[in-house]
Amino acid sequence: MFKKLAASPVIIAIILALALLLWLLSGDKYGAKDNAPAEQQTAEQELSLVEARWSDGEPYQLTRVAQGQVLPWRSISIKSQQAGTIVELLTRQGDSVQQGARLLRLSDEGRSELLTQAQANLTLKKQELASARTLGKSQFLSETELTRLESELARAEAEFENARLALAQIEPVAPFNGVIDRRHVEVGDVVQVGTELMQLVQIDKLKVTAQIPQQHIAALQAGQQVNLRLLDGRQLSGELSFISYAADMATRSFYIEVTVANPELLRIAGGSATVEVQLEPVQAHLISPALLSLNSDGQLGVSTVNQQQQVEFYPVQIVSADNEGARVTGLPERAQIITQGAGFVKPGDKVQVAGAKR
């Protein structure tokens, strides 16, 4: 048999060729199995390595801060409406007075007599006109004479009213409840019409005025609660009561008024205060300012890693910054923020996260 095979070199060559082919095929199969993990490991090694931490947004009370001026609710300078001499002071500086209270008294200067005369003249003119109308019905008085008497009665009424008002004005009264903050006259002073007598202020309620930049005015509305911090550290609360409809042309800021109750009559009118207007709470993340960066469009934002392990850039807005860090809005409620390596990746890159904290 062997002699027969040896005599057939063609058959031997075919067998050897088949054996070689089978050997090569088996080598490729096992080689592929051995190389697959290495190739996968190489691909993983090519991903950029970044560090990240999880951040959860929390409600944050937004405020707008401005410097304000504390003013009395009302303040007027009471001036003399008649000329004369101060004969009596009915209030002292610092007194609280009620609306309608008499404040001082000027000399009469004959005003009482003028009122008495005006009263008598008015009574006479009324009687004359009544008699004339009776005669007019009997056609013993002309229409012209009746008109003249009616005119004289009107003049007498005006003279009486002027005399009554002049006498009343020698005792000026408080136009509203308030405090005598300044008194400018003493007994014996001679005053003219328009002379300043005293300053009356209402301080049981105060108003605080401030200027708000135009970029913040849209978030304000009447009725919002306002916190006030005085220079001595005291804090008060108030309500935003007025917002101007037009900005100041020089500063491009809007005038606001805050109403503040002051039942204890604290001496704070005329001072300054820090105005903090409370806005609607927002979801904000507290981050290190070092994590902020600019994208290719110049937008300020934060780089994150999404569920597909890809880099995402979120534009953010800083709503506050203090010793704890910066609070920003614009991120998802929960975000995996890149803390190391953000400068070496760009949005869309797939990355490998190391040391993610949950």
Image: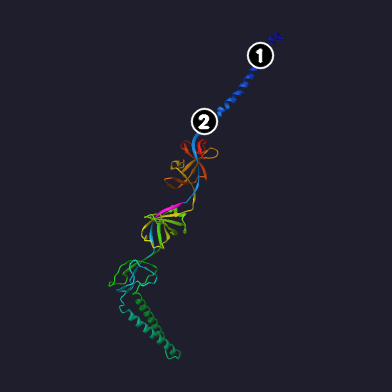
80 and 254: which one is in front? 80
The outermost residue toward the top is 3
Give the left or right position of residue 219, taking residue 95 as reference.
Answer: right
State the image coordinates of residue 111 (x, y, percent, origin top left). 33, 79
Q: Does the magenta stretch include residue 63?
A: yes
Q: Of label 1 and label 2, which has the lower sequence position?
A: 1
- Which kind of residue does numbered mark 2 sit on? Gln
Mark-to-mark CA distance, 1 and 2: 48 Å
Mark 1: secondary structure: helix
Which residues make up the magenta segment?
A: 62-67
Vertical placement of residue 190 versus 221, above or below = below
State the image coordinates of residue 7 (x, y, percent, origin top left). 69, 9
Mark 2: secondary structure: helix
Marking on residue 13: 1
Report the predominant secondary structure element of the magenta stretch: strand
Q: Is residue 103 magenta?
A: no
Vertical placement of residue 125 versus 183, above or below = below
Q: Please identify, in this view, whether the residue under mark 1 or under mark 2 is nearer the observer.
A: 2
Vertical placement of residue 137 versus 225, above or below = below
- Which kind of residue does numbered mark 1 sit on? Ala
Residue at image mark 2: 45
